[in-house]
Amino acid sequence: MPTPTHFSRYPVFPSDTSFPVADIPTISLTKLQAGSTEESSRLYEACRKEGFLFVDLSESRQGQTLLQYGGKMFDLIENTLTLDQSTLEKYACDAPRSLIGYKRKGILKVDDSTRDCIEVYTLSQDDILGNIPPLSNPAPIESNRHDCRGFFESAFTVVNVLLGHLDRQLDLQPGTLEARCALDKPSATSLRMLLSPAQPEDRRINLGGHTDIGLITLLFNVTGGLQVLPAGSENIDENWRYIKPQPGCALINIGDTLTEWAGGLLRSSLHRVVSPPGPQAQLPRQSLVYLVRPEKGATMQRLKGGSVIPPLGDEEDDTRDVDSWAVWRAQQVMDGVLKPESRGGK
Ligand SMILES: O=C(O)CCC(=O)C(=O)O
Ligand SMILES: [Fe+2]
């Protein structure tokens, strides 16, 4: 998570059993950077079994840089999403075609009778890094473009360490996964900044169960509220588990596209956001979600070569373009047609 200062602003995550916590492994970035085969196997196991893991950034220089930028982005969420509604509406996104820009509360279905209660501002990586002509964003973002760039670059540096180990574990040529999402390649990669209002009286779902569409997600939050449905559990309320934020760590989860590319070996897990547990619900909740998507023009086709990813056999290869696939899926989910569920994993 960003810095201890951000943690100290909130009551601690309650320890009573009415807020059951998921068992999520913590992997050391320093050990991965040093090439530890044991840590690499632990990473791969977590990507297959839970689809979620913490990466401890605190001992690594690159990790600490990311923590610092994460802290700055947390301040930016507050400065941006507390602007008045009419200012934010000028940047309204064009969902589901594109989520870049501002999303007000209530656009997404949580279930048949309820809508989401999260405000979101989504920043395009291409915009911040100059892969496309600049877009217009609210003033707090425009005056902090330099820090936004620092966030994207340092977050990708960390993600790239993970992708390098996944190449190795999946018996792919070194650099295979990075080459498909490199920073200078136009893509739908984005940084989602989320803010939910305080909801002390209300134990409700803020963002319905979903899987992330892209390759891999790096997430920072300070208060609880994110929940995962553990592998093998039926989708009923009692089975959902909270993910307890860990200081000095980023939370990572595998997305649908990487699961498809790897022939289902990795797990894209169903997750959702509910009111923060206990006293944490008295304050607004922020979170920062870096969603890595493949380069434009890539397809959903399974990665070939190597001895680990299973060959296709009789199944048909999915030649759809990644971005049109994502828009199609987002529309299905928004309309409540497609019931999201976990994919892949062992
Ligand atoms: O707010 C969170 O903790 C998670 C949000 C999330 O899952 C998403 O934006 O895809
Ligand atoms: Fe998500």
Image (spheres, grey):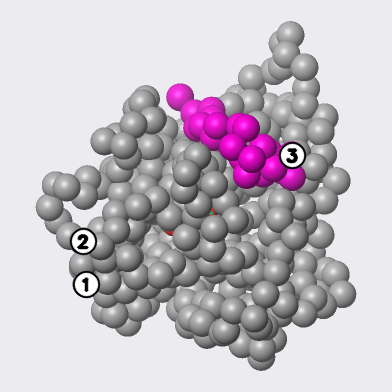
Q: Amino acid at mark 2?
A: Gly
At x 43% / y 55%, what residue is drawn?
206
Give the quarter of the figure containing the C terminus: top left
Please provide the residue range marked out in magenta.
326-346
Q: Is residue 330 magenta?
A: yes
Q: Amino acid at mark 3?
A: Trp
Residue matched to label 2: 278
Q: Is residue 31 left or right of residue 188?
A: left
At x 26% / y 79%, what residue is drawn?
8
Using the image, tell me which numbered label, if any, was put on residue 137.
none
> 176 or 266, which is in the foreground?
266
Q: Position of residue 219 (x, y in %)?
A: 48, 60
Q: Residues within 10 Å of mark 1 (few under 14, many from 20)?
A: some
Question: Ligand 1 near label 2 (Cβ, under 8 Å)?
Answer: no
Q: Is residue 328 left or right of residue 236?
A: right
Residue matched to label 3: 328
Using the image, tell me which numbered label, if any, was put on residue 11.
1
The secondary element bearing badge 3 is classed as: helix
Q: Residues within 10 Å of mark 3 (few under 14, many from 20)?
A: some
